[in-house]
Image (cartoon, coloured by chain):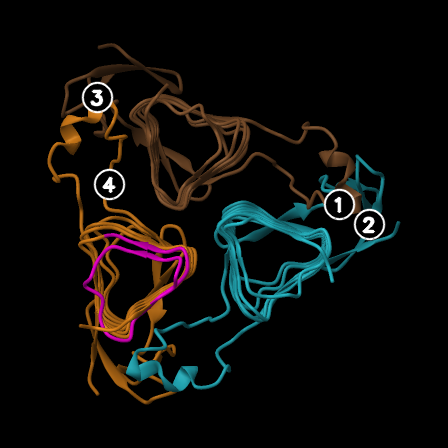
Chain colours: A cyan, B orange, C brown
Amino acid sequence: MATYYKHPTALVETEDVGEGTRIWALTHVMGGVHIGAHCNIGSHCFIEAGVWIGDRVTVKNGNMIWEGITIEDDAFIGPQVVFTNDRRPRSPRFPGARARYETKSWLVPTRIGRGASIGAGAVILAGCDVGPFALVGAGAVVTHPVPAYAVVFGNPARHQGWVCECGDKLQPHGSKWRCPSCARVYEQIGDELRALS
Amino acid sequence: MATYYKHPTALVETEDVGEGTRIWALTHVMGGVHIGAHCNIGSHCFIEAGVWIGDRVTVKNGNMIWEGITIEDDAFIGPQVVFTNDRRPRSPRFPGARARYETKSWLVPTRIGRGASIGAGAVILAGCDVGPFALVGAGAVVTHPVPAYAVVFGNPARHQGWVCECGDKLQPHGSKWRCPSCARVYEQIGDELRALS
Amino acid sequence: MATYYKHPTALVETEDVGEGTRIWALTHVMGGVHIGAHCNIGSHCFIEAGVWIGDRVTVKNGNMIWEGITIEDDAFIGPQVVFTNDRRPRSPRFPGARARYETKSWLVPTRIGRGASIGAGAVILAGCDVGPFALVGAGAVVTHPVPAYAVVFGNPARHQGWVCECGDKLQPHGSKWRCPSCARVYEQIGDELRALS
């Protein structure tokens, strides 16, 4: 059985937590959650049944993560990020909305790609997948999917540049993009970026 | 006496909670709060003395709700919504602001109307009432009152359309507005919408 | 030894808390934090090792405050404010970012000046100091330093006017600025304001 650390005040109802992961104070993880190995889940988080979190993910404090959210390996979720899984919510207790909540057809899933970073306090609308290694700026409101390696910020979030896998800002380099820190080179094809090295 | 459910880790200091309501983990409800029947109050919330919440209201996780806030029946408060009750806050402990906090004249109340939906992470400035069945988009910053049935989003939040009581987007229908899901019809009079059916 | 109040459910691991300070429910304060005298720290906060908070500071509920953040005397931190201390975060567990987190060179400190007010749900980017008595509006995303006495709001936050030490809006008064409440007078020199009385 995997050995992970749980703060004495954390409520962890799943057994599906990987080796070396740490779950901090006053965080509540429901049953039916998968958390991979070597993750760090900060204090004051809530993780709902049905969430899937990969390996080596950092989830900072104050995150509320809903059914339908998948967070791939190596991603960074800053503090107090706001996730959603319903594009037109009503109170499920309101008789006029009861039909809407009889099945799960209201549920719109969202995927945070491998190695992506979601800045503090960003808001991710349901269905707006964030591509691998993309960087969503702090306080951004993401209303459209974010391509791999893209930097977006603002409300609504707009494409502002490209970021390297290592985290540094890419710079134009002839017809390519290049990282000044680690020298990785990328090729832009239409609105997408692809790693060449 | 009403029977409601309280998670063992919730701190509930009011006795004024209606039948069938559920209050989840690590939430703190002060004395002097009214919560109606058949509500669902998520984890990691704080509800201050003086708050009034109607029946069948959904309050998602991570909400901090202040004195002066009233939430009418059937409303939906998304996760991590930010309420306020002071338009020009200073630290009440700062000697230069002590006079301001000697009475409650600084307190500006806000009312969330019946059946309204407040999107995740939205910010509601003190005094900006949200009308019945209005929909405030995720991440919106509401700086003016929101009319009934209005859809608003952005920072500052602007009027973007109309929403039906059932949650679907209204569409123009001759001189009226009509819901494609439930066929309810609405009439626009100036900047306001009125249900006809 | 200083006497302060701690709610029975608060986790306080520092001994460096001043006289008369109150720390409320379900808040976690790490060791290595300094909190001054006569502060009020709301529920559901997390305060990380290395934070320094002065005297008579109000920290409302739901704040997550990171190493590198300094909050001077008499400041007001509204509910659910979002602080940051890393401008290009990656998961420190991601092998491709491990070098970045071997030292603390990623850490960018931020100072909230004496008597300043940070509105509810505002986002403060790392390194954006907020000057004394400035007022950051609710929901603002602060991407540049804020001068003393400035009012800023929006995403990105922009300069919208000036505020008196006492909290009221300053008005033009000949070549000066004057507070209609307390009659204090200020002089503008370039982009900065200086108190004359």
Q: Name the residue under label 2.
A: A186
Residue at horizontal 57 percent and vertical 70 percent from the top? A68
Q: Do the residues labelled 4 and 2 touch (CB within 8 Å)?
A: no
Q: Where is residue C106 in the image (x, y as percent from the top left)?
A: 66, 31
Q: Which of B124 and C178 is in front in this view?
A: B124
Task: Tell me the SS state at disc 1.
Answer: loop
Disc on res. B87: 4
Image mark 2: chain: A
Label 2 environment density (alpha carbons within 10 Å; few <14, some 14–19, many ≥20): many
Residue at horizontal 39 percent and vertical 45 percent from the top? C9
Could you give the CA–CA distance between mark 1 and mark 2, rounded to whole angstroms? 9 Å
Judge whether residue A113 can be spotted in this image.
Answer: yes
Q: Position of residue A32 (x, y in %)?
A: 59, 71
Could you give the CA–CA distance between mark 4 and mark 2, rounded to whole angstroms? 48 Å
Could you give the CA–CA distance between mark 4 and mark 1, rounded to whole angstroms? 42 Å
Q: Mark 1 points at which residue?
A: A164
Q: Do the residues labelled 3 and 1 touch (CB within 8 Å)?
A: no
Residue stretch in magenta: B6-30
Image mark 4: chain: B
Q: Which of marks 1 and 2 is in front?
A: 1
Q: Name the residue under label 3.
A: B96
Could you give the CA–CA distance between mark 3 and mark 1, rounded to whole angstroms? 49 Å
Q: Which of marks 1 and 2 is nearer the N terminus?
A: 1
Q: Do the residues labelled 2 and 3 touch (CB within 8 Å)?
A: no
